[in-house]
Amino acid sequence: MPRTALALGAIVALAFGLTACVAEPEPEPEWTEETAYAEAEEVFRAYWSLDTDEQAELATPEMREVNEKGNARIKELGAEVRGKSVVQSLSFSGYRTVGDEVVVDLTACIDGSNVEVRIDDDDWKPAREDAVYGVVSQLESSDDDLLVAELSESGDAEC
């Protein structure tokens, strides 16, 4: 019996030793280019569909500050805005990782033909002369989400 117990103990110890030496597989990356682009499109379209005062949950703190300043300027001018612009098309221009974080660059064509502005109870007027225009945006990961970090008009976009 003792030999059987010793042999069994040796086998268990050997098995434990072998499994302890087996390297753990590397974890799958949290973001792939494909998943980052899919998430970026979903977040950007959702962000664009919201009113500026509702966009905070999809924006970085810096972008929220930019939105707040823009909203304050509109109120300061006594302007009212009605209508919604829509994302007409979207294309990706960059994907990169920095450590565990990911950054996605995109260009979107926006149709603002339904947006009108009025200042000081004057007549409603189109918000822009060029109703279809391009914007560039950068989205950055924060924890498990992508957030809009930068947004500006692009004269280079072909819309």
Image: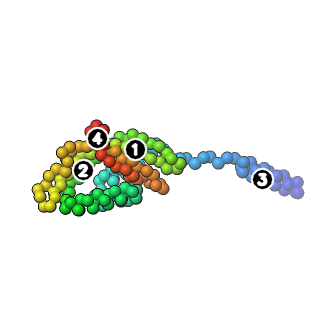
**Callouts 3 and 1 close, C-beta under 8 Å:** no
- Tag 4, which secondary structure? loop
- Tag 2, which secondary structure? loop
- Front tag of 2 and 3: 2
Q: Which residue is mark 1?
A: 105
**Callouts 4 and 3 close, C-beta under 8 Å:** no
Where is residue 154 drawn, in percent x and y?
A: 30, 43
Which residue is drawn at the image coordinates 13% and 61% (left, top)? Answer: 121
Give whichever of discs 1 and 2 has the lower sequence position: 2
Where is residue 148 drawn, in percent x and y?
A: 38, 52
Q: Which residue is mark 3?
A: 12
| Residues packed near mark 1 inside 10 Å, few (<14), some (14 to 19) or many (20 plus) | some
- Count all numbered tags in the image, as a single digit: 4
| Residues packed near mark 2 inside 10 Å, few (<14), some (14 to 19) or many (20 plus) | some
Where is residue 62 drawn, in percent x and y?
A: 39, 57
Q: Identify the image quadrant of the N terminus.
A: bottom right
- Tag 3, which secondary structure? helix
CA gap, disc 2 to disc 3?
68 Å
Furthest residue to the left?
123
> Which of the two residues, 53 or 65, is positioned nearer the viewer here?
65
